[in-house]
Amino acid sequence: MAKTQGRTAVPFEPKPAINCGAQKLETMPNIASKERNILEVALAYRQRFGWSIIPIKTGTKKPAVRSWKPYQQAPADEKQLRRWFGNSKQRSVAVILGQVSGNLACRDFDLESAYRTWAERFGELARTLPTVRTSRGYHVYFTARIEKTIHLDDGELRGNGAYCLLPPGVHPDGMLYEWVVPIPNGKMPEIDPVKAGLAPVSNRQKRTEENRRYLKKSEEIRRDQKAIVVSDEIKLAITAAERGHTPSASF
């Protein structure tokens, strides 16, 4: 397999443009390329996708603002973005997830092996859900109502109250974030993260599913028991007929 900065490539090749139904996906390097001004990139994310964008201090994952909490409620306007990114300071770009960005959510795979396992099982989603290569793994983006960050063995499922660095941001270790599966021109894909294998089944969902299986099994047992009773009554009726008398009315 080919190597990408010392890592084994995933077992599929993300294409610059992918057809997802009637919707064409755009190649993100046109928006987030290293050649573009960081202000242009920030404005593109805000204007084209409606995301709430904040600046990140270079070489860190920390916001370059006193507080980013207000931008969980409403995105910064163009004037604010120009103040943040138009002053020649070298900054990275981050998006605030959740309702403020159209219920944008992110599955953070810290382990590339975990991402490959998921991608092999859900190949079509892996080829269509917007995905960023990070320092250690991948960020897979979609829309869903995720009320809080869920910590997992191989990463996190992020929604309200969280943010993620976006291309062409730079990780503290120097790794450049890059899109490997592009963002759609229209709406972000909306999925059920549990059915898509991106979120664990909750205890409540487990109990519900167990109850469904129990009820189904109980119904099957009742049908089998009823079938046995009917079969016994039929045998009794046949026996009675053969002996030439009417069987008891108890059946």
Image: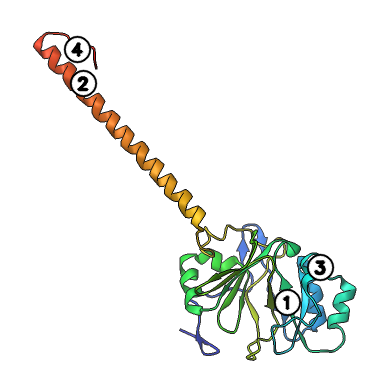
Q: Amino acid at mark 1?
A: Ala
Badges 1 and 4: C-beta atoms under 8 Å apart?
no
**Distance from label 4 to label 3 (Cα)?**
81 Å
**Which residue was labeled with disc 2?**
234
Q: Residue at x 44, y 45 (%)?
A: 212
Q: Amino acid at mark 2?
A: Ile
Q: Which mark is residue 94?
A: 1
**Distance from label 1 to label 2 (Cα)?**
74 Å
Judge whether 243 appears above or below 102 on screen. Answer: above
Sequence-first tag of 4 and 2:
2
**Which residue was labeled with disc 4?**
248
Secondary structure at numbered mark 2: helix
Tag in front: 4 or 3: 4
Badges 4 and 2: C-beta atoms under 8 Å apart?
no
Secondary structure at numbered mark 1: strand
Q: Amino acid at mark 4?
A: Ser
**Which residue was labeled with disc 3?**
75
Query: Which picture quadrant has residue 223?
Result: top left
The image position of residue 87, as x and y in percent, is 87, 86
Identify which residue, 38 or 148, lies in the foreground: 148
**Distance from label 1 to label 4 (Cα)?**
82 Å
The image position of residue 4, as x and y in percent, is 54, 86
Q: Residue at x 35, y 42 (%)?
A: 217
